[in-house]
Amino acid sequence: MVTVTRIIDSKTEDLRALRSQVRAEYEGFRARKLALDMTRGKPSPEQLDLANALLALPGERDFFSQAKEDVRNYGGLQGLAEARALFAPMLGVTPDRIVIGNNASLAMMNDCIVWALLKGVPGGTAPWSQTPQPAFLCPVPGYDRHFMITEEYGFRLIPVPLNGNGPDMDKVEELAADPAVKGIWCIPKYSNPTGEIYSPETSQRLAAMRTGAPDFRIFWDNAYTVHHLTPRRHEVANILELCEKAENPDRAFVFASTSKVTFAGAGLAFFASSAANVRWYLGLAGKRTIGPDKVNQLRHVRFLKNEDGLLRHMDAHRALIAPKFDATIAALEARLGGTGVAKWTKPEGGYFISVDVVDGTARRIVELAKEAGVAITPAGATWPHGRDPYDRTLRLAPTYPSLGDVRAASEVVALCILLAAVEKQCESQEKKAAHES
Amino acid sequence: MVTVTRIIDSKTEDLRALRSQVRAEYEGFRARKLALDMTRGKPSPEQLDLANALLALPGERDFFSQAKEDVRNYGGLQGLAEARALFAPMLGVTPDRIVIGNNASLAMMNDCIVWALLKGVPGGTAPWSQTPQPAFLCPVPGYDRHFMITEEYGFRLIPVPLNGNGPDMDKVEELAADPAVKGIWCIPKYSNPTGEIYSPETSQRLAAMRTGAPDFRIFWDNAYTVHHLTPRRHEVANILELCEKAENPDRAFVFASTSKVTFAGAGLAFFASSAANVRWYLGLAGKRTIGPDKVNQLRHVRFLKNEDGLLRHMDAHRALIAPKFDATIAALEARLGGTGVAKWTKPEGGYFISVDVVDGTARRIVELAKEAGVAITPAGATWPHGRDPYDRTLRLAPTYPSLGDVRAASEVVALCILLAAVEKQCESQEKKAAHES
């Protein structure tokens, strides 16, 4: 057994021995013909089981809201008052500032972008489509589906590095001075995929900064706000309050959903914002639909009951998924600790572990893992247009597979990271030697 | 009692007597302080009760599709195969040509308009927003919510008269030759509000006509396709087949929903079209959402089971609502038959009765009815921008109130129609007399 030290400091003969050994081990995994999937942040069947009561709710004789609306019929564009009240603490606003959509907060974000392009937003002087090339700030690494919406509708996507407390605010402030820059994608808590939590200072600067566009919007996707992995329920600043205090009351659109609370495909989505933005949203949503699915809202109210019910439900999720995150981190630590070839996050919430590997090896690792029967998110997915200029960041999603599978898959990934790093270092030393000789 | 003959032929003294008598009767209704609503095409509570089994479906242990997808989780953008199969006969296409949305077909129409504007549609050379002022054909009287979508996004709305077999096709063909005309709103069966059924010839001409725009689209909202009011299940031509045969395969977007089958607020919506249009739709919908609410699809499959279950369910609706249509028509007949002041439809399906009154009295009638405690759809609502140039068409929606309320409301409306007509005729004769003297 070769002792693994910092790969970069190893002697060529040691590296070659290590490469042979790791390759042999890799071939052993390949022979096992695994079929494991760590690509997407999907709840596991056991997590979904926690909400199975929803499948028989609200029951055949229960179809009136507190206000005596028949939830089966048309109407109720903003959502049931009791459902808005239930999620108001989670969203940090009063219920009148919440709109409940159907099953996807992504759809609400998409609609805001589309409406902004075609109609404009409060505070703007024209629809965004009249800006020659509107641009959007994309903190990286980030969520591919965010970037794809703005890509689809022709925005220029400007990556901004995340620094562990949210985006690099010096950069953001500099870029936002350009009037063509219309907004920024943010996942303020347990960010996808880095797990980082925006600091109060980051939030404050976002709320208060000068922007070139008077109608600049923060798309504040608080997707993981109650999705803790430790007993500590981290908080982020209340962006709507900060914006109001900074006299930019309409700057933030807040989004959230129960996709990773109840059912990923059949939950509730939320939009929360200033009074003017809520009016704007409802005005356009009211052209699109007579109302959302209120039966599903009543179902959620009956099931979760109140904020306490929601938080206890999230504790049950944590009990199921925290061990999977631990297993992945343990596998990375066991194989890669001390080698200097990778850094990984230890998130305290959310759905992802982000791994930075040796530059130029992320794509190779994804291929190696695939060959060995382990699917991970394509390298580059966390960057605009799917192109990571450093070919560096891997996103691991440990929630969906069983604990045993997470262990096996994480071992394979860790081995592939090591193999790719050793291969690269060997090549580099061999080239250097050839050059010198 | 004054005998009512054709009002227009009546002598002035008879008309004055009639006016006094009708006014007295109207005051009698006003004194009763009714509060009745015939404004919107909403199912009644009894109709919704027919689907109450949905409120406890699919049940706590039933969450797999035939293809073993976990319907609780993400995915399944096009909709469950068994749900598409169930509704394929209703839509007249194979299941692969169907996309299932959430609870509102209006939302799917809205999205098609928005995507056409921002991205263009198959066969087009540019997004519709690049046409200086895109226009849309609006058969009148028609559905206000259709017109409002195209109004909201800046289309020029061009009314085209309906002639009892669908829109006046000579007019449509003439107008569609303009490349700025991008599409037409159609409700081909039991049209809202006229109840008319597009003839095979109308459909054929729509499918085959030359259009100035190569990317012209028929928005074929088959909202009432299984919503019969008589034992006869009327058919309309299969527009997708006609378009294909006419070598305009991508011309029609077909929409439908179960809003008036199961729950108005919690049903399923459908888009059906050519292979190219379905690919286009899914490409853009896939940016907007990871998938629709598949639990609700499974719920509908478990409840309706198959085409036969669907048709029997619609028979139960008919049993509840046909008597309400009969009551309205009887009230109109009793009060207005032979007077020559109104013509009304006798629909064999759908949700509305359309009444053409004396030109220039529709708004007055809505006011009179309101004063007497009966809400009916604002006059003009069936025309683009809510402006009926003749002030002629009233839309009555008899499904929601109880049978007794429908009777009472219809009597009031009939009386108001008569009163407005008599008032107008008296005025006109009095003016004429003053002019001659």
Image (cartoon, coloured by chain):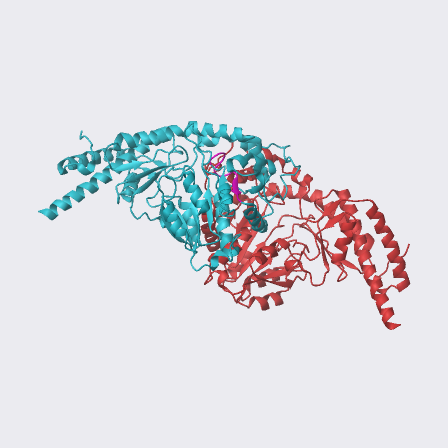
Chain colours: A red, B cyan
Residue A17 at what x, y percent from top left?
90, 58
Residue B33 at what x, y percent from top left?
30, 35
- Is B35 located above or below residue B138 in the figure? above
Q: Quadrant of the N terminus of chain A?
A: bottom right
- In the picture, residue A395 is in which quadrant? bottom right
For the residue pair A237 and A407, the one nearer the viewer reads as: A407
Q: Residue furthest front?
A: B246
Q: Is residue B356 left or right of residue A297?
A: left
Residue A334 at what x, y percent from top left?
82, 52
Q: Main secondary structure of the magenta part?
A: loop
Q: Is residue A435 left or right of residue B238?
A: right
Q: Quadrant of the C terminus of chain A?
A: bottom right
- In the picture, residue B204 is in which quadrant? top left
Residue B168 at what x, y percent from top left?
36, 45
Residue A79 at least partly seen: no
Is A187 contained in the magenta span? no
The magenta segment is B260-273
- Is A276 located above or below residue B192 in the figure? below
